[in-house]
């Protein structure tokens, strides 16, 4: 059992205290991030891009996710560990059950799946089987070939209404957490108010219960030299990487990150 549990995150939501989340892919960074007070570590399938050098998350396999989840579990100092279900593992209920079992046995406390309202049944079956689920809505990178790029979602009224309805349906189906990626701040705020479960945002403004960033981004590391609008580089002014992690946690808790320049 980690020190931070879903109960902790629910209490933080109720009290209005923000919580900090970061991606982690190995034991060393899992150790440094959790020791700095990051409450939730995500083994994201973003590892396909930042570690493996692919141009999307699609090539990431369940074996890759198991390997990195095991490594993060070994370094973790009490944070909640969440692992991504990779591309196509939710195409059928049977595949979702098999892949989620493998991630939980590798050390995850929660699995995250990308999708929308159609995943309600999968979420409720996983939950009934003791597997807590985070539903990832908004920009879902595994669908990049359908959406035609990494674009902000929910800008139009009809799409915003659909996202809100999906969030409510998935929370009712038993989702333990929601993650909203790249949606307008006003929509993220409305979704966060409308569900009783904790909502984590990345590029979703300041009003979600928790904040998430990809570790490499918040350390200012990218092969292109560019960072997305919603990212802040926490390295400048810090003597070392552990201090940058602490600065991130402090900025999230103080409501200083994200700032208006990071919002859509
Ligand atoms: O894979 C990942 O790192 C993610 C975050 C961008 C939320 O899903």
Image (tube, rainbow, N blue to C red):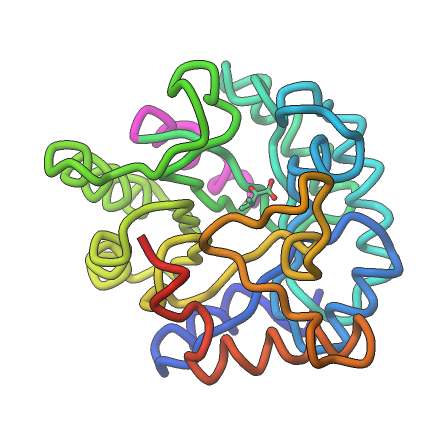
Position above or below: 223 against 30: above
Q: Is residue 34 magenta?
A: no
Name which quarter of the figure residue 213 lies in.
bottom right
Q: Is residue 109 left or right of residue 240?
A: left
What secondary structure predominates along the stretch shown in magenta? helix
Taking the spot 73% from the left edge, 70% from the top edge, the residue there is 34
- Tell which quarter ligand 1 is in: top right
Q: Which residue lies furthest to the left in this view?
A: 157
Q: Position of residue 210 (x, y in %)?
A: 46, 66
Taking the spot 70% from the left edge, 67% from the top edge, the residue there is 2
Q: How many labels does the image show?
A: 0
Comparing 12 with 216, the one in front is 216
Q: Is residue 128 left or right of residue 163?
A: right
Q: Where is residue 181 in the image (x, y as percent from the top left)?
A: 42, 45
Q: Quadrant of the image for the N terminus? A: bottom right
Taking the spot 64% from the left edge, 53% from the top edge, the residue there is 217
Q: Where is residue 39 in the image (x, y as percent from the top left)?
A: 61, 69
Q: Position of residue 208 (x, y in %)?
A: 36, 64
Position above or below: 115 against 128: above
Q: Is residue 247 left or right of residue 160?
A: right
Name which quarter of the figure residue 170 lies in.
top left
Comparing 186 with 220, the one in front is 220
Q: Is residue 130 magenta?
A: yes
Q: Is residue 87 left or right of residue 211?
A: right
Name which quarter of the figure residue 169 lies in.
top left
Q: Which stretch did the figure color magenta?
A: 117-131
Comparing 139 with 195, the one in front is 139
Taking the spot 30% from the left edge, 37% from the top edge, the residue there is 153
């Amino acid at each position: 059992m980690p020190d931070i549990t879903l109960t902790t995150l629910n209490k933080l939501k109720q009290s209005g205290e923000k919580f900090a989340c970061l991606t982690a892919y190995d034991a060393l960074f899992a150790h440094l991030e959790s020791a700095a007070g990051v409450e939730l570590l995500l083994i994201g399938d973003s590892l396909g891009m930042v570690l493996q050098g692919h141009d999307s998350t699609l090539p990431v396999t369940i074996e890759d996710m198991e390997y990195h989840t095991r490594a993060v579990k070994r370094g973790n100092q009490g944070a909640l560990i969440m692992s991504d279900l990779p591309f196509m593992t939710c195409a059928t209920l049977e595949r979702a059950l098999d892949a989620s079992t493998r991630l939980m046995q590798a050390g995850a406390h929660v699995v995250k799946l990308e999708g929308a309202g159609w995943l309600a049944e999968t979420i409720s079956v996983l939950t009934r089987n003791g597997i807590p689920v985070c539903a990832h809505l908004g920009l879902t990178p595994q669908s990049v070939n359908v959406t035609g790029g990494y674009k902000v979602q929910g800008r139009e009224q009809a799409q915003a209404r659909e996202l809100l309805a999906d969030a409510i349906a998935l929370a009712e189906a038993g989702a333990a957490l929601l993650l909203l990626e790249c949606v307008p701040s006003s929509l993220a705020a409305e979704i966060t108010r409308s569900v009783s479960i904790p909502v984590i945002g990345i590029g979703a403004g300041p009003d979600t219960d928790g904040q998430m960033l990809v570790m490499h981004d918040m350390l200012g590391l990218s092969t292109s030299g560019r960072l997305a609008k919603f990212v802040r580089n926490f390295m400048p002014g810090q003597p070392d990487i552990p201090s940058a992690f602490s600065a991130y946690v402090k900025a999230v808790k103080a409501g200083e990150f994200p700032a208006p320049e990071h919002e859509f």
